[in-house]
Amino acid sequence: MATLSFHTDPALEKRIRSAARKRGVPLSSFIKETIERSLERPHLRGADVRGIVSGKSRLKPEDLALPPWNESDPLLR
Amino acid sequence: MIYLLDTHTLWHHASDGDGLSALAAIRLDEAGIEDLCILDVSLYELARHMAVGRIEVDDPHHALATIEKSYPILRSNAAIAWQSASLDWPKRNGRGQHLDPADRAIFAAAILHSLTVVSADKEMHAHAPTAGVSLLW
């Protein structure tokens, strides 16, 4: 995946490679999996998890509310 | 902007209780899930509240696991620990330091990661301008 640098800035490239390493999968698999999941899942908002422990949420407790890769995760900065 | 939910905020949001301010409820509901986070110590705080009966749920472990699965969690680390221990945080009444470990850890995380804390805590509101922490309620 040497072409990754053509599509991203250096900081984002570093974060993507770091996240793939953390997951322990090849970079290409990580990118494919991440994109596939993000396309499958509608964008979640706070309102979607509000009441998640009271049964009032739109999501069921069994549903995974987190996206596969959190772009805003401070740990990835 | 990424919101860091104080423990009581987390519980009011996760349980859909009426304890959120109108502004906090709107902002948290409108935010993308990736723009919300909680500090891991909040799980300890909630567990403690459940264990002593301040928060009543049928299955505390399941409730905690559901929250863990549903909200992005910021993990404590050495930087947060040291920042927390190093904070000069005088109490509002001027009698010593505000020593609540969870409050200090949340503020430390907010400082280090430039997060906006969502809380009604009066000690936090009093100290936020000095600490340079953005606070919402």
Image (cartoon, rainbow, N blue to C red):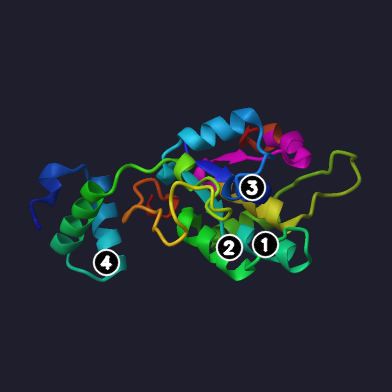
* Image marks 2 and 1: residues in contact by CB distance under 8 Å: yes
Residues at marks 4 and 3 touching, judged by CB atoms closer than 8 Å: no
Q: Residues within 10 Å of mark 3 (few under 14, many from 20)?
A: many
Q: Residue at x 72, y 40 (%)?
A: B124
Tell us which disc is closer to us: 1 or 3. 1
| Residue bearing the label numbered 1 | B57
In the displayed structure, B103 sits above or below B133; it is below
Do the residues bearing badges 2 and 4 touch, measured as CB atoms within 8 Å?
no
Q: Earlier in the sequence, mark 1 or mark 3?
A: 3
Residue A2 in the image: x percent, y percent?
9, 56
Q: Which residue is mark 2?
A: B63
Is A75 magenta? The answer is: no
Tag 3, which chain?
B
Q: Quadrant of residue B116?
A: top right
| Marks 4 & 3 on one chain | no
- Residue under label 4, please give it: A21
Q: Amino acid at mark 4?
A: Arg
Q: Amino acid at mark 3?
A: Asp
Between marks 2 and 4 in the image, the one whose residue lies nearer the viewer: 2
Q: Is residue A67 above or below residue A30?
A: above
> Element type at marker 2?
helix
Residue A69, x across and y down, in percent: 32, 54
Residue named by callout 3:
B6
Judged from the image, the secondary structure of the residue bearing numbered disc 1 is loop
Tell me how far mark 1 sits from mark 3, CA to CA: 20 Å
**Which range is magenta?**
B112-128
Dot 4 lies on which element?
Answer: helix
Q: Residue furthest top?
A: B23
Q: Please give the chain letter of the residue carrying mark 4.
A: A
